[in-house]
Amino acid sequence: MSLILSVDGKRVHATTGGRPFDVTRPTTLFVHGAGFDHTVWKLQTRYFAWHGGSVLALDLPGHGRSEGPALDSVPALADWLFRAIDAAGLATAALVGHSMGSLIALEAAGRHPERVRALGLLGCAVPLKVANVLLEASADNQHLALDLINAWGYGSRAQLGGHRVPGLWMMRGGLRVLERAAPGLLNADLRACNDYQGGEAAAAAVRCPTLFVLGERDIMTPPKLALALSKKIAGAEVVMLPGVGHIMMEEAPDATLDALRRIL
């Protein structure tokens, strides 16, 4: 099911995990990564929506079915996220973000700790420096940028197969989502990640239960950087997924869900 919000006079699309959105239930916002949209959260959103909570898996501005333009900085996206929370009628929410989405969730929790009840950071690293070849290819809207993200985003096991649904290939599915993005969108996202410098300060301001979910084989956001960041947040937990790459929600959906259940 979908929910349409109005933020800054623009149409914002979110999915609700297959159940009507209920503002009276504890709500979790799921925030996708660079170039992606709400569809990366298939299993996780449905589980929490059907187990006592409400869910909003947002399409960020200019992504998926949300109106643009895209915002090109993590602080701007963090402020936008709270305007979306206000538009949904929520006083507080849990935030779960992946990759760029994890930076947005982290910055948001640091800016307004009183409004975030729990924080899940998947594939999170600070600094999140983007390879020059990827920045350059995305600036020219080359398909190479999509191919690189797809190749670097999955662990070697996932690249050979292993989708839970027979006949489906997760790498091709991920690539198709990236191919749907508007020209210039991926580059704006990657520059936002590359330029973000507030991660450590935001981490120091976080006051809610926090969980890092890391892929052992993640080459896009190396686990050693996430482990260092986790030490900046009092009481933060870390779950390492063996043999898994960067896009763990697709590659290891059950293990990712089991990890998130620790705080949600």
Image (cartoon, helix red, strand yellow):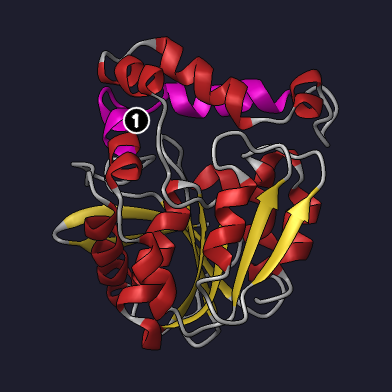
The image shows residue 231 at horizontal and vertical percentages of: 57, 70
Which residue is found at the position 52% from the left and 16% from the top? 147
Query: 19 above or below 169?
Result: below
User: Any magenta on residue 157?
Assistant: no
The residue range painted magenta reads 169-189
Residue 90 appears anywhere in the view:
no
Which residue is found at the position 84% from the left and 29% from the top? 162
User: Any magenta on residue 181?
Assistant: yes
The image shows residue 178 at horizontal and vertical percentages of: 46, 27
Assign the magenta stretch its main secondary structure.
helix
Residue 106 appears anywhere in the view:
yes
Q: Is residue 255 left or right of residue 12?
A: right
The image shows residue 258 at horizontal and vertical percentages of: 78, 63
Give the residue number, with chain letter if any, for mark 1. 186
Q: Identify residue type, mark 1.
A: Leu
The image shows residue 207 at horizontal and vertical percentages of: 47, 85
Viewer-closest of 12 and 121: 121
Q: Is residue 237 left or right of residue 190?
A: right
Viewer-closest of 162 and 198: 198
Q: Extreme left residue here?
A: 9
